Image (cartoon, rainbow, N blue to C red):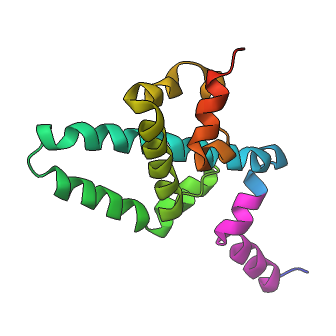
Amino acid sequence: MAGPEALADIQNSLSNPELVLGAVRSPAQEAIQPELTALVAAMTGYIDWVMDSIGESLIGSYGMVTEALRRRRVEADASDRFVERILGLELDAEQYDRGTAFASGVVERAGAEGLRRLFDDLAHLPTPNEVDAPGLWLARIDLPS
């Protein structure tokens, strides 16, 4: 196919983010996407927990600030989502809630010190299943090596 139809097809392909991403991401990147998303969820949960635990004492209007930040996360526009997708992330309200539940679950079972252990060792990074079940993560990191 040559001519205007071919040009139109190329233009349509390049303007479709899904096709561009499919060409950019390798099968190996696709394979680690669940782990990457889980890790970002856990890190976001940790950051939110830390901010929530100290925010009110530092910023009088912390409730308004954190609400605006959380709203911004879930109401991100297409360009923000495109950058996330290029990086292999699929961050939506469910993933942020997943991270919050992970951090809360760890703190509930092991306190703030338990949550801090997330950064003790690369081997302590949670798996996708552990993000969904923080008790599994705590059990694994407490097992002798």
Question: Where 81 sits versus 142, above or below?
Answer: below
Horizontally, residue 110 falls left or right of residue 11, namely left
Horizontally, residue 11 falls left or right of residue 51, namely right
Image quarter for residue 16? bottom right
Visible residue check, residue 21: yes
Question: Where 78 sits versus 32, above or below?
Answer: below
Image quarter for residue 138? top right
Q: Is 119 in front, or is 111?
A: 111
Image location (x, y in percent) of residue 50: 32, 37
Q: Residue at x 46, y 28 (%)?
A: 114
Q: How many marks?
A: 0
Image location (x, y in percent) of residue 92: 51, 62
Magenta stretch containing residue 18, yes or no? yes
Visible residue check, residue 44: no
Question: Where 12 sits versus 49, above or below?
Answer: below
Quadrant for the C terminus, please. top right
Report the predominant secondary structure element of the magenta stretch. helix
Q: Residue at x 54, y 55 (%)?
A: 83
Q: Is 14 in front, or is 124?
A: 124
Q: Which residues are magenta?
A: 4-22
Image location (x, y in percent) of residue 29: 75, 45
Q: Is 115 in front, or is 68?
A: 115
Horizontally, residue 30 falls left or right of residue 127, namely right
Q: Residue furthest top?
A: 145
Q: Residue at x 26, y 60 (%)?
A: 67
Question: Where 57 sits versus 89, above or below?
Answer: above
Q: Residue furthest right?
A: 1
Image quarter for residue 2? bottom right
Q: Is 66 in front, or is 11?
A: 66
Q: Residue furthest bottom?
A: 5
